[in-house]
């Protein structure tokens, strides 16, 4: 089957009880034994559940892996993978990863003795030089969040393998429709299924996918042992979302390309980050490695924090909110929201300054999106900023979420 057919069918045609076409939600914690010591394949839902199994088979099929574990969140997926390593092991991680990934790696380093190097992995010599005798894995996130830098998965996986280590790819930003890391040499793929795979902003979830039995087995063991498993209802929602992954991704990309081109010519925009623009420094690599450019666009506002706050407060279709990959458009400020938990020096090193705004471009009518951004970016023309408090400074979320998301 081709990808679109797999998205709809893989893992789901298995209901032997009543032949339901759509996977039932097995909302049960436990399963009756058929006899002492004999089950019908399931005993307890932390260990395995038929609805979760359908989703796991579906995601494994889309990524071309042999097995997937569906877990409670994207961070649970990363936590599960990090438990493959021991105190004293070293991991090389891209320096502009998701803020929560940086925070978790830092926690593992401070509390459990993992050694972490954050490295600019677009520099292959720097990547090579970062390997030590105790290095066990390279952690790749591409496109990066929020600056959409593209890393060469094939080249980095080759370096990892030459050193006898694993290549781990976070494929959240593109989904298996746009990028298939196993074909480029990755050994493990992680997802926040919260994002494009589910696609409807109504669930948090994650997945770990393996393409070798000697990795699939420990990941499955750890998912159960650590208690990371996703709930049956959440799995059902993600499975339903995946059925429309491909048509959604096509619309996201079409709209994102138009939004990026609009922003690129706007006088109040200093810089646009979108791999689909020819001027993007890794456009050619994105074309070669990816099957599409995705739905995320970031840009730097011409001006300072006052102008940034004005834009964030002015959009009406783009909602000011964290997360990404849903059908609706979102706008956010990485420095004070998604990446607030990241150490400021690492943020700076990665080029994430306070003028950067990130958009998750949804699948609304693109004209509404462009009109919305145009009116929010109108500050030069109408000089609205004279009304903005001169003291306006970088504000972090009041409810403390900025530190925790
Ligand atoms: C690239 C990436 N990986 C992992 C995560 C964590 O996922 P979750 O929020 O589902 O725990 C995120 C969240 O934004 C992300 O952007």
Image (cartoon, helix red, strand yellow):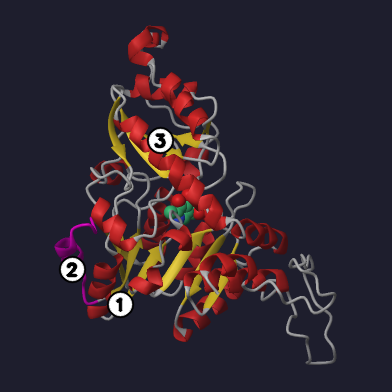
Q: Earlier in the sequence, mark 1 or mark 3?
A: 1
CA separation, marks 3 and 2? 36 Å
Element marked by disc 2: helix
CA separation, marks 1 and 3? 40 Å
Q: Residue 127: within the magenta?
A: yes
Name the image quarter holding the N terminus. bottom right
Element marked by disc 1: loop
Which disc number belongs to residue 165?
Answer: 1
Residue at 81% x, 75% y: name it.
Answer: 19
Residue 256 against residue 44 in the figure, above or below: above
Q: Residue 161: within the magenta?
A: no
Q: Which residue lies under the disc numbered 3?
A: 259
Q: Which residue lies under the disc numbered 2?
A: 128
Picture quadrant of residue 277: top left
Q: Earlier in the sequence, mark 3 or mark 2?
A: 2
- Relative placement, left or right, of 106 versus 129 is right
Q: Nearer the viewer, residue 94 or 222?
A: 94
Element marked by disc 3: helix
- Pointer 1 local density, CA inside 10 Å: few below 14, some 14–19, many at least 20: some
Residue at 47% x, 40% y: name it.
Answer: 361
Q: Earlier in the sequence, mark 2 or mark 1?
A: 2
Q: Position of residue 141 (x, y in %)?
A: 36, 58
Magenta range is 120-133
Picture quadrant of residue 181: bottom left
Which disc number belongs to residue 82?
Answer: none
Q: Nearer the viewer, residue 188 or 317?
A: 317
Residue at 24% x, 55% y: name it.
Answer: 284
- Pointer 3 local density, CA inside 10 Å: few below 14, some 14–19, many at least 20: many
Residue 314 against residue 51 in the figure, above or below: above
């Amino acid at each position: 089957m081709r990808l679109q057919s797999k998205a709809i069918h893989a893992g789901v045609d298995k209901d032997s009880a009543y032949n339901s076409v759509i996977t039932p939600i097995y909302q049960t914690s436990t399963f009756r034994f058929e006899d002492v010591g004999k089950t019908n394949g399931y005993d307890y839902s932390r260990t395995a559940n038929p609805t979760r199994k359908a989703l796991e088979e579906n995601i494994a099929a889309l990524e071309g892996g042999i097995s997937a574990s569906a877990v409670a969140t994207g961070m649970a997926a990363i936590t599960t993978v990090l438990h493959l390593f021991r105190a004293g092991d070293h991991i090389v991680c891209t320096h502009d990863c998701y803020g929560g990934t940086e925070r978790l790696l830092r926690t593992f380093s401070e509390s459990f003795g993992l050694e972490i190097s954050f490295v600019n992995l677009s520099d292959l010599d720097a990547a090579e030089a970062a390997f030590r005798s105790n290095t066990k894995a390279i952690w790749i996130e591409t496109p990066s969040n929020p600056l959409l830098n593209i890393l060469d998965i094939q080249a980095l996986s080759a370096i990892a393998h030459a050193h006898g280590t694993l290549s781990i790819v976070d494929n959240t930003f593109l989904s298996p429709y746009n990028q298939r890391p196993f074909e480029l040499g990755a050994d493990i793929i992680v997802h926040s299924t919260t994002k494009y795979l589910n696609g409807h902003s109504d669930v948090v979830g994650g997945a770990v996918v393996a393409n070798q039995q000697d990795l699939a087995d420990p990941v499955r063991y750890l998912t159960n042992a650590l208690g990371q498993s996703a709930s049956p209802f959440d799995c059902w929602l993600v499975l339903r979302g995946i059925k429309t992954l491909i048509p959604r991704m096509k619309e996201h990309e079409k709209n994102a390309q138009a939004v990026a081109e609009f922003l690129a010519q706007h006088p109040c925009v200093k810089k646009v980050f979108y791999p689909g623009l020819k001027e993007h420094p890794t456009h050619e690599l994105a074309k070669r490695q990816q099957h599409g450019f995705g739905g995320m666009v970031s840009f730097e506002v011409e001006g300072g924090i006052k102008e940034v706050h004005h834009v964030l407060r002015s959009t009406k279709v783009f909602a000011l909110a964290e997360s990404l990959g849903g059908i609706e458009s979102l706008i956010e400020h990485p420095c004070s929201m998604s990446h607030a938990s990241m150490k400021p020096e690492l943020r700076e090193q990665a080029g994430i300054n306070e003028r950067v705004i990130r958009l998750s471009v949804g699948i609304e009518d693109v004209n509404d999106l462009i009109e919305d951004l145009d009116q929010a970016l109108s500050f030069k023309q109408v000089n609205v900023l004279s009304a903005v408090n001169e003291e306006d400074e970088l504000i972090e979320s009041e409810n403390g979420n900025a530190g925790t998301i």
